[in-house]
Image: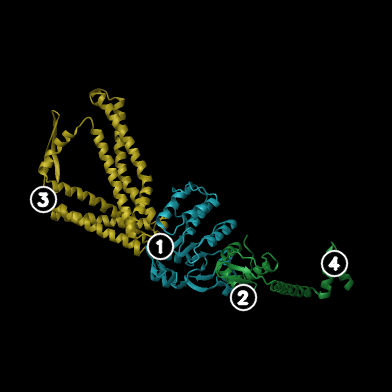
């Protein structure tokens, strides 16, 4: 199945994000060899040139490196991967918190919601309790 | 490359010609069978007394057979035109004109295959005529019949006539091809334009040929059997032959060659430089 | 590097109507280019000029630096938007034909692809379904290692699953040093595989740009830009 993209944004940057996600989430282990450009492009159903561009950009971040004859590999630097993971998490959380702010929930209330969702089954009911408490 | 084109054109045209010829061969074998039957049945069925059913059936079959023979001659022309039109101008032209070959090669292949089938059809017809004669008229009698002809007319003239026949076949095929080539330039109505062009060319050619004949030819009759009789198993004929047309024949051949060269060049030029497949 | 496709002041008239007016377009090797425009904008005309089925009214067109002729035809693999093969031929006969005439045709690859689609090579073309016939023609086109692939509406009139298959086939089989020119009006399906887009409006080139540049510059997808440019 082809990967999903938002065609309104450059595809190469979306490819970069997706592969980066695959690396930090462990789908590609540190030091593991990545599939060839052609294979990745075929899997994603994109133009090999676009995939090539994405990979070149990813090389710049240091998360992958190229061995001239044998292809591309994930870095063995686990600290770098962990740091990238944290950065992504922070970005996504930041976006999430912005959205919650639009609903009127600050970070502390958000934390409470997270805890209640974690510990109970009936998430909806607890959230409305929270609203009642606020009033 | 040319061999591959020949292979392709031959396969495509065989689908049309082989059935036609097979039917002809079958029909002529049946005709031969009926002929033998008719002859062996004796004079009662061939004239004399009451007309028998056999006579009527054989006569009808003979008539249909002759019609089919004429149809074969027509079909030979139609099949060649149809194949050219389909592969050079209609849908299959998308394949033909994107093959890595020159338009000269395409045209050469078409011409060779057309000539091939014309020869095959003629050969089959001639063989069938000999088949009909077999057992009743032998080679010796034929030689006798034509002996005066060969006596009076120089060998070279007969060769010239054969050459003239071949040239006119080739020229005839090319006339169709060049008409279709010019016709296809009119993308909206290629077929009608082709027919129009062909008609125009033929009118001009025939008029020019008539004028040419009047001026260069003092005797239109090549040779004719002015009288013939059959008696005591011998055939005699008076042949009237004339040589006044020898020069005419050579000049006519040269004109045909000129037309062939001209039509060939125009056709290949149009498909090479002015192609318009819409 | 010689551009794989270069046309200079190309104009093509059909009678009084101009299908293409003063087209100047250069395509480099190794790119997948979309020739985008509504019906009647001249896409098929331009492609047929490159394939050698039409001659321009004026202007010059070269493929790998050569004028159109037998040499360029050996370098160009053309997929028309119509059925152009003899129906009485079997699939294997057509494959033999391509093998005979084109040096850069890979017979094994073609049979492999037919196998995967479970199309019996012994079948006559006229007995195949329309979808299968189109797939066979696509396989023939993509089994050639060409310098320029001309695909005229390869996914038009085809169901979504077949569209995915066709795009996948194109991506995995083309000669990477070659260029693919895809003419289509179904842009959203195709834009993810394009490097460049050429917008053809009323017979002239209105935009020719790398696709990611369009996304950066206009902040929208090629499909969205197309709808703007060609709004009725």
Q: Position of residue A135 (x, y in %)?
A: 89, 73
The CA span between labels 1 and 3 is 54 Å
**In-front residue for pair C186/B9:** B9
Q: Which mark is residue A116?
A: 4
Quadrant location of the C terminus of chain B in the rendered image: bottom left
The CA span between labels 1 and 4 is 70 Å
Q: Nearer the viewer, mark 2 or mark 4?
A: 2
Q: Is residue A35 left or right of residue A121?
A: left
Q: Residue at x 25, y 55 (%)?
A: B203
Q: Secondary structure at mark 1?
A: helix
Mark 3, Cα crowd under 10 Å, few <14 / some 14-19 / many 20+, is: some
Name the colour assigned to chain B in the rendering: yellow
Q: Is residue B169 left or right of residue B93?
A: left
Q: Residue at x 13, y 41 (%)?
A: B149
Q: Which mark is residue B165?
A: none
Q: Nearer the viewer, mark 2 or mark 3?
A: 2
Mark 1, Cα crowd under 10 Å, few <14 / some 14-19 / many 20+, is: many
Name the colour assigned to chain A in the rendering: green
Name the colour assigned to chain C in the rendering: cyan
Q: Secondary structure at mark 3?
A: loop
Q: Are marks 1 and 2 on the same chain?
A: no
Mark 3 highlights which residue?
A: B244
Q: Which mark is residue C73?
A: 1
Mark 2 highlights which residue?
A: A60
Q: Position of residue C194 (x, y in %)?
A: 55, 68
């Amino acid at each position: 199945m082809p990967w999903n993209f938002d065609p309104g944004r450059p595809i190469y940057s979306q490819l970069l994000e997706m592969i980066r996600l695959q690396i930090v989430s462990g789908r590609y282990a540190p030091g593991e060899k990545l599939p060839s450009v052609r294979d990745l492009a075929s899997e994603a159903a994109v133009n090999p040139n676009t995939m090539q561009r994405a990979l070149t950009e990813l090389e710049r971040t240091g998360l992958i490196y190229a061995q001239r004859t044998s292809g591309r590999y994930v870095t063995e630097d686990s600290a770098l991967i962990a740091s990238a993971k944290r950065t992504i998490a922070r970005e996504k959380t930041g976006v999430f918190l912005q959205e919650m702010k639009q609903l009127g929930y600050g970070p502390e209330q958000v934390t409470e919601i997270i805890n209640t969702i974690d510990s109970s089954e009936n998430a909806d009911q607890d959230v409305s309790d929270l609203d009642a408490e606020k009033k | 490359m040319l061999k591959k084109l020949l292979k392709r054109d031959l396969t495509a045209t065989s689908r049309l010609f082989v059935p036609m010829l097979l039917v002809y061969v079958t029909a002529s074998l049946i005709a031969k069978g009926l002929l033998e039957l008719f002859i062996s049945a004796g004079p009662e069925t061939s004239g004399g007394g009451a007309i028998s059913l056999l006579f009527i059936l054989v006569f009808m079959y003979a008539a249909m057979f002759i019609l089919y023979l004429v149809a074969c001659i027509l079909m030979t022309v139609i099949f060649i035109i149809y194949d050219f039109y389909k592969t050079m101008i209609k849908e299959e032209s998308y394949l033909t004109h994107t093959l890595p070959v020159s338009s000269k090669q395409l045209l050469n292949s078409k011409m060779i295959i057309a000539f091939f089938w014309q020869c095959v059809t003629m050969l089959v017809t001639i063989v069938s005529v000999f088949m009909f004669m077999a057992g009743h008229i032998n080679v010796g009698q034929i030689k006798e019949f034509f002996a005066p002809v060969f006596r009076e007319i120089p060998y070279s003239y007969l060769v010239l006539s054969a050459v003239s026949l071949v040239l006119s076949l080739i020229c005839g095929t090319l006339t169709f091809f060049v008409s279709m080539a010019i016709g296809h330039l009119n993308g909206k109505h290629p077929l009608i334009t082709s027919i129009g062009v062909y008609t125009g060319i033929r009118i001009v050619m025939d008029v020019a040929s008539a004028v040419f004949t009047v001026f260069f030819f003092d005797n239109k009759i090549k040779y004719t059997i002015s009288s013939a009789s059959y008696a005591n198993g011998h055939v005699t004929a008076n042949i009237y032959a004339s040589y006044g047309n020898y020069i005419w024949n050579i000049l006519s051949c040269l004109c045909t060659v000129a037309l062939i060269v001209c039509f060939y060049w125009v056709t290949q030029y149009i498909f090479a430089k002015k192609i318009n497949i819409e | 590097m010689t551009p794989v496709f270069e046309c200079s002041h190309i104009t093509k008239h059909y009678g009084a109507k101009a299908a293409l007016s003063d087209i100047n377009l250069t395509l480099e090797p190794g790119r997948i280019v979309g020739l985008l425009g509504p019906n009647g904008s001249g896409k098929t005309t331009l492609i047929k000029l490159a394939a050698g089925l039409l001659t321009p009214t004026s202007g010059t067109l070269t493929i790998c630096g050569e004028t159109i002729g037998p040499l360029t035809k050996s370098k160009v693999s053309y997929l028309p938007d119509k059925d152009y093969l003899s129906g009485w031929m079997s699939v294997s006969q057509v494959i033999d034909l391509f093998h005979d005439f084109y040096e850069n045709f890979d017979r094994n690859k073609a049979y492999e692809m037919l196998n995967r689609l479970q199309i019996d090579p012994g079948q006559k073309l006229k007995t195949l379904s329309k979808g299968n016939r189109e797939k066979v023609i696509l396989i023939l086109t993509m089994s050639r290692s060409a310098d320029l692939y001309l695909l005229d509406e390869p996914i038009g009139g085809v169901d979504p699953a077949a569209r995915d298959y066709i795009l996948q086939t194109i991506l995995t089989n083309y000669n990477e040093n070659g260029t693919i020119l895809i003419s289509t009006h179904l842009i959203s399906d195709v834009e993810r595989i394009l490097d460049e887009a050429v917008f053809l409006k009323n017979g002239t080139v209105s935009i020719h740009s790398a696709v990611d540049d369009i996304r950066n510059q206009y902040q929208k997808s090629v499909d969205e830009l197309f709808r703007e440019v060609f709004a009725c």
